[in-house]
Amino acid sequence: MKIAFAGDHAGYLLAEPVRKLLEDRGIEFENLGTFGPESVDYPDFAHALAARVESGQADLGIAACGTGNGMAITLNKHRGIRAGLAWNREIAGLVKAHNNANVLVLSQRFTTEEENLACVQTWLDTEFEGGRHQRRIDKISL
Ligand code: RB5
């Protein structure tokens, strides 16, 4: 299992704790940047992450920006991506159980690091429920 990560200047600080959490679980981690506090444009990193997941080079993705919204909006332009924004662990569980999100999107500015890591754990540990949720997912694409 390999998970790629992308963050802008308001999300990149989550890369290291997320890397540690994933590697402790035996999951391969790839950081697509950004790597410092200089201002960047989140779509550049969201599109790179989407390409990794859509091509199968990564099984799943994790993205982070200030609110999470810029990353989520951009990622969801891609047909092969269902990006779910989670500000707490309950939502992180639901974006897997109900939405089968293949990219988890985090907010570095409005969620604590501890809660963000709990979001990652919960998202990984939760199973997609299928059934009526699969039917609804099948209706998403235009
Ligand atoms: C950057 O200041 C901020 O706008 C960005 O990280 C994100 O929150 C956008 O949705």
Image: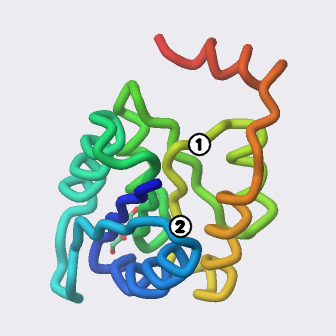
For residue 89, side relative to residue 106 (left or right)? right
Mark 2 Cα shell of 10 Å, populated few (<14), some (14-19), many (≥20): many
- Foreground residue among 41 and 60: 60
Location of residue 5 with respect to 51 vertically, above or below: below
Residue 35: x and y in percent read: 21, 82
Residue 139 numbered tag: none
Residue 79: x and y in percent read: 39, 25
Q: Provide the secondary structure element on which disc 2 rests.
A: strand
Q: Provide the secondary structure element on which disc 1 rests.
A: loop
Residue 37: x and y in percent read: 23, 88
Location of residue 29 with respect to 61 vertically, above or below: below
Q: Residue at x 75, y 68 (%)?
A: 89
Q: First in sequence: mark 2 or mark 1?
A: 1
Q: Quadrant of residue 100?
A: top right
Query: Which quadrant does ligand 1 occupy?
Result: bottom left
The residue carrying mark 1 has its beta carbon less than 8 Å from ligand 1: no
Q: Label 2: which residue?
A: 106
- Residue type of the residue flagged with mark 2: Leu
Residue 101 numbered tag: 1
Q: Residue at x 51, y 73 (%)?
A: 22
- Residue type of the residue flagged with mark 1: Ala
